[in-house]
Amino acid sequence: MSHISRGKEFLHNSTLGQKHLRAPEKRLLVMAKPNRNLTLCLIAAVVAVVAVLTCGRAAHGSGGDERASVGARTPPPVPIDLFSPSNARTEDGKLIPSAEFFPAARCAKCHQDSHEQWAQSLHRNAGREPFYKDSSDILQRTRGVEFTRHCEACHAPVALL
């Protein structure tokens, strides 16, 4: 069966001259010619994203939970200078056993002016400030004590001794 179209009326060959079927005109969606350069750029962008994601997964291992694997990383070697990166030093260049530390009040017995200035300064509480403590604790828990040395060099240099 074939159909003949006259404007909006569609006629069947067997019923020429009779209105057999009225149907709205079908309109085709005409698309503009695709821009070849744009298409190539989009394909290149998708390939680049996939490559970056693939390389990133390979660099981080199996792609498991990154937070779980952070602690499993090998810590950096302990620096030759035990006090690095701080400028604080002991006379003999060795660490002081914690049992031999004395409170700051002991310093005040001979160095009252210095102790009073220190007691009123930000340096006194730099290692006890809540934001610093939380950040330091998270860093130590996730990366190891070796990573906290950089912060302690300024906030709590005695911790390096």
Image (cartoon, grey):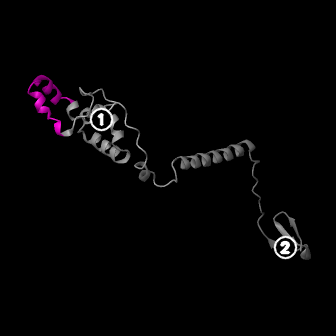
> Up-down: is 22 above or below 112?
below
Magenta segment: does it hold 119? yes
Q: Would you say 75 lies left or right of 98 here?
A: right
Residue 30: percent from left, percent from top: 76, 53
Q: Quadrant of the N terminus?
A: bottom right
Q: Residue placed farthest to the left in the image?
A: 109
Q: CA distance from mark 2 to mark 1?
A: 93 Å
> Up-down: is 135 above or below 20?
above
Q: Residue at x 28, y 34 (%)?
A: 160
Which residue is at the front of the view, 64 or 80?
80
Could you tell me how many numbered marks the image carries?
Answer: 2
Q: Residue at x 75, y 44 (%)?
A: 36
Range of residues picked out in magenta: 99-122
Q: Residue at x 89, y 71 (%)?
A: 2
Identify residue for label 1.
152
Q: Amino acid at mark 2?
A: Lys
Magenta segment: does it hold 108? yes
Q: Amino acid at mark 1?
A: Glu
Identify residue for label 2.
19
Which residue is at the front of the view, 15 or 114?
114
Q: Quadrant of the C terminus?
A: top left
Q: Secondary structure at mark 1?
A: helix
Q: Would you say 4 lies left or right of 130 here?
A: right
Residue 4: percent from left, percent from top: 88, 68
Decide which of tag 2 and tag 1 comes sooner along the chain: 2
Q: Secondary structure at mark 2?
A: loop
Q: Residue at x 25, y 42 (%)?
A: 130
Quadrant position of residue 117: top left
